[in-house]
Every structure is written in C-alpha cells, then in structure tokens.
Amino acid sequence: MKVVFHYSAGPRLAARLAALPGLEVVVCPEEDEAGFAAAMRDADVLWHVLKRCSAAVIAGAPRLKLIQKIGVGVNTIDLPAAAARGIAVCNLPGTNAPAVAEMTLLLMLAVLRRLPRFDAELRAGQWVCAPADQDGLAELGGRTVGLVGYGAIPQRLAPVLRALGCRVVFTSQTRRDDPDWCTLPNLLAQADIVSLHIPQTEATTGLLDAAAFGQMKPGAVLINTARGGLVDEAALLAALRSGRLAGAGLDVFAVEPATAGHPLLALPNVVVAPHVAWLTAGTFDRSLTIAAENCARLAAGQDLLHRVQ
C-alpha cells in the first residue's frame, strides 16, 4: 500500500516511516509541488498535515482511498470532493494534545515575561531591562485564564494552570453543569488571558472580531494555537496597537505561511511560531501508530478509527 506523507521528515522521522511494515511511505515536503503531484498519481493513502488537500489534489489521485489527517482539524481538506469520490477521511483526536498544551503554556509565559525581546537584546549585547519595561512584566499565577473550547488540549492544560495559581474558566459548544463553565461573552469579560481551542468552521471563522476584542478586559492577552481563521487579524492588530490588548501569542495565522511583511510580526508585544505547537517526536509517535493501524484496517476492509466522513 502506497502512502504519501505530505510534510518534511527529519532523519528520525524518516527512519520511522521507512520501517513501517506493509507500507511504502513516500515523503513529500510541502514545497515540492511537482513531486507531490507525481506521488499522488498512484497513492492509496494520503497522510495529510497542513497544506490544503484541494479538489484538484483529490482529482489527481485516482487510486486514493483514505485521507488521514495527522492532527485533528480537517478544515484544510476538501470534504465534499472526498465524499464525491467515496474517499474516507479520518483524523487523530488527542494525539497532539500534550504538545499543544505545553506550547500554549509556553506562549502564555513568553508573552507575559517578554522572553523573545530579552533573548534578542541579550544576543545584541544588551544586559539590561529598561525601567520603562519593568512594569509590563507579569506572572501567570493569580490570573484568570479563559479557555475557548474544552477538548483534549484545554482539559490537559487546565489542571496545570490551576497548579500555577490561575483561576480557569471555559466555554464550550454545549452548556456544562460545571461552575467554571460560562458563555463566551462572560469569558471574554473576565479573562486576563484568552486561549483558543476550537476547530475552524463556517460558524467560528472570525469569531474574535473587533466586537469581541471590545468585550475583553483592557490589558488582556490572546493565545491562539488552534486556527488562524478564528481571529479577525485586522481587528487583532488594531487592539494590540491601541493597547486594548497587552499582547498575543500566535502559532497560527489566517493565511499560512505568514510572510515576512505580515504586520503582526512587527509588533514587539506579539510572540509568534510557524504552526509548530503540535510538532514533537511524541506527537509523531502517537500519530503514526494510529495512522498505520488505519492503513491495515483499510486493507482488511475493517472499520476505520476516528472516521470523520
């Protein structure tokens, strides 16, 4: 069975992929469009990571039977095109939860303590914290953290935050009989840090817009390790420039890859990463185990794990 892994692979991961029994795994970096198109012509399975799996990609893969998302969100897959061909789509809920939870915490701390700025200044020979910057340095403990969504990642993160002295509130699509549950407007009004943990759908695209930022506490911080499209970036930029928000930690952007001229990258109160919150050896170990199992199930005509459609 031929599998196309649509992402780059370092030496450890490449060796792991080559050793998977019963599978011919072809690694195609996202930037190699010609190589990817060629590999998909006789692919049985696509292991999809981030770059969009469009209707054109699906049309160019006549043997394709399964699109396996390495991760959770399937907004980058043309689901109607896959359904029209009878191609199964599966994801891997929970496999990246430890990594994303840790990265979310890292971004919170990096924004509050201005770590990238200190790192850059020290490398430039400046052993100093300017007096004007001292008042802006903050601790995580004692703050209210609002988690938008309450799946595997925020459920892993919440007890860690509480252990650090935070008050945690959350919202979810369905109301919960939990004293920490609240509506989104209530969460925005009371949270010092708002962290996004929901999928991007038609209903959630642009969820945090100018009106939402206006509901947030002055001096609040936004963390996004979910999907860039959840946020109106123009409104976020305005809120950060005006001081309405004290800072943001962003692993994701509305259009990826973000270019060097993106205005959010120029702000000193924004900490950024290139959509790598999920990216650890542990995530790949957990993900490949299930992805390989689904290939075996596909070959045997058995029900697939975590089938989305």
Image (cartoon, helix red, strand yellow):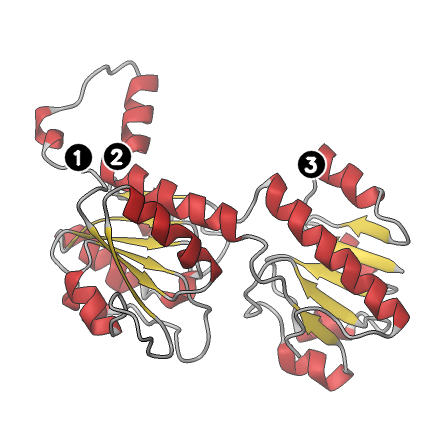
Relative horizontal placement of residue 46, taking residue 212 as reference (left or right): right
Q: CA distance from mark 1 to mark 2?
A: 7 Å
**Amino acid at the residue labelled 1:** Leu
**Amino acid at the residue labelled 2:** Arg
Q: CB atoms at circles 3 and 2 under 8 Å apart?
A: no
**Amino acid at the residue labelled 3:** Gly
Which quarter shows the N terminus? bottom right
Relative height, residue 251 to residue 47 (above, below): above
Dot 1 or dot 3, earlier in sequence: 3
Residue shown at the point (85%, 62%) measured from the top left: 296
Residue 10 is tagged as 3
According to the picture, the residue beneath numbered tag 1 turns out to be 137
Q: Nearer the viewer, residue 83 or 19?
A: 19
Relative horizontal placement of residue 289, taking residue 177 as reference (left or right): right
Residue 114 is tagged as 2
At label 2, counting other C-alpha atoms closer than 10 Å, the crowd grade (few under 14, some 14-19, many 20 or more) is many
Q: Where residue 232 appears, x then y in whole percent?
A: 32, 66
Q: Nearer the viewer, residue 38 or 176?
A: 176
Relative height, residue 240 to residue 74 (above, below): above
The image quarter in which residue 183 lies: bottom left
Residue shown at the point (62%, 62%) measured from the top left: 92
Q: CA distance from mark 1 to mark 3?
A: 37 Å
Camera-near label (1 vs 3) is 1
Q: Describe the element under mark 2 as helix, strand or loop.
A: loop
Relative horizontal placement of residue 53, taking residue 16 as reference (left or right): left
Q: Is there any visible trace of residue 277 in the rendered image?
A: no
Q: Where residue 168 appears, x then y in whole percent?
A: 26, 56
Residue shown at the point (8%, 25%) measured from the top left: 131
Q: Where residue 300 appears, x then y in whole percent?
A: 89, 70
Dot 1 or dot 2, earlier in sequence: 2
Q: Describe the element under mark 1 as helix, strand or loop.
A: loop
